[in-house]
């Protein structure tokens, strides 16, 4: 049991297990919190992006564990490099409410803006993640059929600063975790701390307004968000053509959409410099391979076929 002093506001802690909060939200295991206030009845905790929760003193003492920290970092084995800069907890999400309001009558552009926001701040979906309703049912009546897959360690969308789960983490290990069958983290390639999440959003929005036929972004909003763009300059890095938003269809429920958020190295995920707005068709051509892997494939093909080798040399000359 953790002992805490009434005036100890410099304590950093994490939750032992993932539990549901209401019907739609999970409280994630091992995510880092700072103690904000403690009156020995309730404890207020703040995590990244200034999100906060309040728990009873008994829950705090039973369900949380203390983390080491110094003047620069808080230390946790569940995060890359096993530490997180304290400055990350002073960073707020960038509000794009004014931008969304300005383009509310332009649904195509608005959808692209919202997609940029989603990619910046949320991890990818996961259909195998258990729902809170099914989780609650399981806790009442646990299933014992070992052949049936119950839940998954990866959340079905979560904040991108949730603890990343290694690709080597097995389902069998998950079943032995204290949180099972609740999720415990996100994919490694989805992980990004608040500072990088904000950078990704600004980068993607700047790309949108650098496309051909992009709408005019009000100067006030541009300066407020710190956007940097030059119209008619953004290209699809796969085909080299300038991206044209005149025929944009960003309805992801449709069979076709003309633009996509492409990854130069798919395994690296949505990181600044690795994600860009490109053609959906080009993204399909690239497939799940990185640009470098595709170039290596072309080189192998050219080595065994003089015709292709000469074609490449002619194009590059």
Image: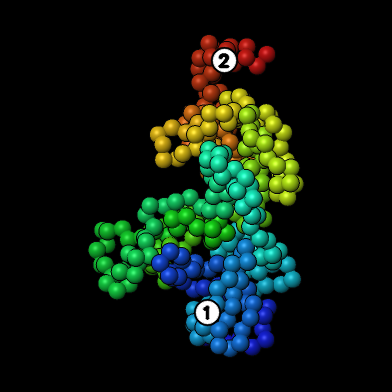
Q: Residue 44 versus residue 127: which sits nearer the camera? A: 44
Image disc number at residue 80? none
Q: Secondary structure at mark 2?
A: helix
Where, by quadrant of the figure, is residue 128 drawn?
bottom left
Q: Decide: is 256 above or below 202.
A: above
Q: Give coordinates of residue 99: x percent, y percent.
A: 63, 47
Q: Residue 129 versus residue 148: which sits nearer the camera? A: 129
137 left or right, relative to 70? left
* Disc 2 target residue: 309
Q: Residue at x 41, y 36 (%)?
A: 254
179 left or right, relative to 119? left
Image quarter in which the C terminus is found? top right
State yes or no: discs 2 and 1 in contact (Cβ < 8 Å): no
Q: Residue 248 versus residue 87: which sits nearer the camera? A: 248
**Alpha carbon distance from label 2 to label 1:** 66 Å
Where, by quadrant of the figure, is residue 278 drawn?
top right
Q: Decide: is 256 above or below 219.
A: above
Q: Give coordinates of residue 257: x percent, y percent.
A: 47, 33
Q: Decide: is 46 above or below 268.
A: below
* Disc 1 target residue: 55
Q: Residue at x 43, y 64 (%)?
A: 24
Q: Give coordinates of residue 47: x percent, y percent.
A: 60, 68
């Amino acid at each position: 049991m953790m002992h805490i002093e009434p005036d100890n506001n410099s304590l950093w802690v994490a939750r032992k297990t993932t539990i549901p909060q209401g019907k739609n939200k999970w409280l994630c295991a091992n995510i880092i919190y700072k103690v904000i206030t403690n009156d020995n009845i309730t404890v207020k905790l703040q995590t990244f992006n200034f999100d906060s929760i309040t728990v009873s003193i008994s829950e705090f003492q039973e369900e949380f564990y203390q983390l080491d920290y110094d003047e620069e970092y808080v230390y946790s084995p569940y995060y890359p490099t096993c530490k997180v800069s304290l400055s990350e907890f002073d960073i707020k999400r960038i509000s794009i409410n004014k931008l969304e309001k300005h383009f509310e009558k332009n649904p195509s552009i608005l959808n692209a803006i919202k997609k940029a926001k989603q990619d910046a701040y949320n991890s990818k979906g996961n259909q195998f993640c258990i729902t809170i309703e099914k989780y609650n049912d399981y806790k009442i009546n646990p299933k014992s059929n070992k052949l049936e897959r119950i839940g998954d360690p990866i959340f079905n969308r979560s904040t991108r600063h949730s603890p990343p789960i290694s690709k080597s983490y097995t389902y069998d290990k998950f079943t032995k975790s204290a949180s099972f069958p609740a999720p415990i983290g996100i994919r490694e390639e989805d992980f990004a701390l608040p500072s990088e999440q904000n950078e990704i959003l600004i980068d993607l929005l700047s790309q949108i307004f650098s496309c051909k036929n992009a709408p005019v972004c009000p100067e006030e909003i541009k300066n407020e968000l710190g956007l940097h763009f030059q119209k008619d300059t953004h290209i699809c890095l796969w085909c080299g053509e300038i991206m044209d938003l005149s025929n944009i269809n960003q309805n992801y429920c449709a069979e076709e959409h003309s633009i996509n958020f492409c990854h130069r190295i798919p395994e690296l995920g949505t990181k600044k410099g690795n994600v860009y707005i490109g053609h959906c068709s080009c993204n399909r051509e690239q497939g799940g391979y990185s640009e470098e892997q595709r170039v290596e494939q072309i080189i192998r093909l050219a080595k065994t076929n003089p015709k292709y080798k000469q074609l490449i040399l002619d194009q590059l000359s």
